[in-house]
Structure formats: C-alpha cells, structure tokens
Amino acid sequence: MTLFGMNDRHMAVLEQELNVNVSLRNQELKIDGAAEDQALAEQVISKMIDMLHHGEIIDASRIRYAIALAREGRLDEIEEILGDVVAITHRGRRIQCKTLGQREYVSAVRDGELTLAVGPAGTGKTYLAMAMAVVALKNKEVERIVLTRPAVEAGEKLGFLPGDMTQKVDPYLRPLYDALYEIMGVESYQRLLERGTLEVAPLAFMRGRTLSDAFIILDEAQNTTPEQMKMFLTRLGAGSRCIVTGDLSQVDLPRGKQSGLAEAVRILQGIEGIHVIELTAKDVVRHELVQKIVRAYEAYESKEGKEA
C-alpha cells in the first residue's frame, strides 16, 4: 500500500511517466513495456523500496524526481537527500530536502554567511529558509529572526492603502506569516513577536540599520532595485546570517527597471563566504501542475528569445 499509494496512485505516476504497465500478482511485480522503460521502472521501484525501508515517505513528486534522476543515470544520488531533517514543525512533521538542488541550498546556508537562492515558484526557497532560521534561533546560534520583503512600491505609495502601517504592509508579508505559522505555530509566533525576537517588516524599514546576531531573510528579492539590494546587503552585522530568495522570471518592477537580485547574482558570484544557488523546474516540490507550468513558461520564453 505504501509503495503503490492510495488506489495505486504512485504506480499510475510511474506508468504514465515511463509508458509501462505495472501489476502485482502473488507478491511478484510484473513490468510490461519497452526494454529501456522496463529497466528504468525497475530501478525506480527498487530505490523506492529502499527508501521505505529507511523510513522515508513516498509521494508522487518524489517518484517523478526519482524518474528524472534515473533518466540521467543519477538515481543513486537520491540517497544524499535521505535522512537529513532540516527542522521539525510544532506538529511533529519533519521538514526534509526533497531534491538535490534543495540539499545544495541547505548546505550552502549552513556553511556560508550569505546565500542567494534563485529559482521558480514551488522550489521551497522561502519555506526552507524559514525552517533553518527557526532552528538557528532554537540552537541559540542567533538572537533574533528578521524577515523582510519589498513592497513593489518600495514603501513610497503605501499611504494609499487603508489602516495603520502594520495593516498597510500586511498583504505583502502574509506569505511569510503563513510559513511561520506552519513551522512554529501561531502561539510561538506571537510570543516571539511580542519579545522582539522575531521581526517581520517591509524592506523600506531596513535603511540605516545594522542587523547583528540575526538570521535575516529577504524574500521576493527579484522586486528590489539595485539600490535597495545594495542597501539591504550592507545591513549585515557581526554574527548574522542572511538568505536572499527570488524568482527572476517574476519581476514586478516597472518596465525597464533592473532587478537588484539579478545584478547581485552577477556581482557576488565567486566571492568567498557567499553562495549563489540556482534551483530549477526539477526542484519544484509544490503541486505537480506547478512544475508543468514552470516548464511551459521556460519553453515559451526560450522560444520568444530566439525569435527576437
């Protein structure tokens, strides 16, 4: 049941992706299809069984990822992401890397002081960053967590929104709240917020500050200008670690305005202590349709670029 999934859902994914037919009779698996597809299916199923023996959870996204690695002859590399728990939520759920790209991302954050994570929606950039920040706080590696995001208007036009400043910036910061609620629970979140151990603020509020002994996360950084990015990166103080995340395919800046994240990736590449991690469509772990959407847009933009 665990291998095949509810109503054989997992095997349906395998059959669809590899164009094979898998059946179980008298405790014996039979795989029908072209010889090459049969061999790939056998490799993937054997690896899934090994993962189940190690207590890993099998789902459709993990099977698709295993198939992608098998096609590249890299299936054994999936063992690199097994057993490494990034964090445990307040409900006891384990947060783990699901792809090699995510594993590289987590390793970079653990090893460096500044990590730039660039990749499409659904690759876990923000969620994993939040999880690592909470762990660092619990382990007393930092004294506080600072989360920030650019309001696309950079703070100047927030006056048009109703309410006080907290209410004005709330819509921009809501995705950060949601991730924190899931990882640490609403009560812990509120308690840390009241103590000042946790700060969630728009990027415009970072100017003129020095952030020491903090775990700092700048989310949606593709919507920063070069000036804002430089301002933010120079806020880093002693004992702090910083993660900058963004998706360069979803820049909401005015036409003709360069993304500060794109510029930072070019400028900071190769500097000691700074890691630039580029996640791809293969690292998408959200709903399977998200991966298909990302790939479709990549193909379309590539075609448009060639025609231009």
Image (spheres, rainbow, N blue to C red):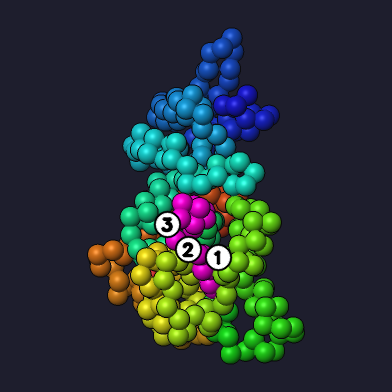
Query: Which numbered circle lies on residue 141?
Result: 3
Q: Give the range drawn in magenta.
A: 131-149
Quarter assignment of residue 81: top left
Q: In this view, does 286 lie above or below 13?
A: below
The quarter of the rendered structure image containing the N terminus is top right
SS label for mark 3: loop
Q: How far apart are marks 3 and 1 (CA)?
A: 13 Å
SS label for mark 1: loop
On whether residue 269 falls in the magenta region, the answer is no
On whether residue 133 falls in the magenta region, the answer is yes
Quarter assignment of residue 308: bottom left
SS label for mark 2: loop
Residue at image point 67% right, 30% down: 6
The amino acid sitting under disc 3 is Glu
The amino acid sitting under disc 2 is Glu
Q: In this view, does 128 lie above or below 256?
A: above
Residue at image point 41% right, 85% down: 227
The amino acid sitting under disc 1 is Thr
Q: Distance between the residues labelled 1 and 2?
A: 7 Å
Q: In this view, does 23 lie above or below 138?
A: above
Q: How many marks?
A: 3
Query: Which numbered circle lies on residue 281?
Result: none
Q: Residues within 10 Å of mark 3 (few under 14, many from 20)?
A: some
Q: Do the residues labelled 3 and 1 touch (CB within 8 Å)?
A: no
For this rendering, which residue is in front, 105 or 262?
105
Query: Which numbered circle lies on residue 143?
Result: 2
Residue annotated with mark 1? 197
Q: Is residue 307 visible?
A: no
Q: Distance between the residues labelled 2 and 3?
A: 7 Å
User: Which of the two labelled residues, at mark 3 and mark 1, occupies the earlier sequence position?
Assistant: 3
Q: Do the residues labelled 1 and 2 touch (CB within 8 Å)?
A: yes
Residue at image point 35% right, 63% down: 113
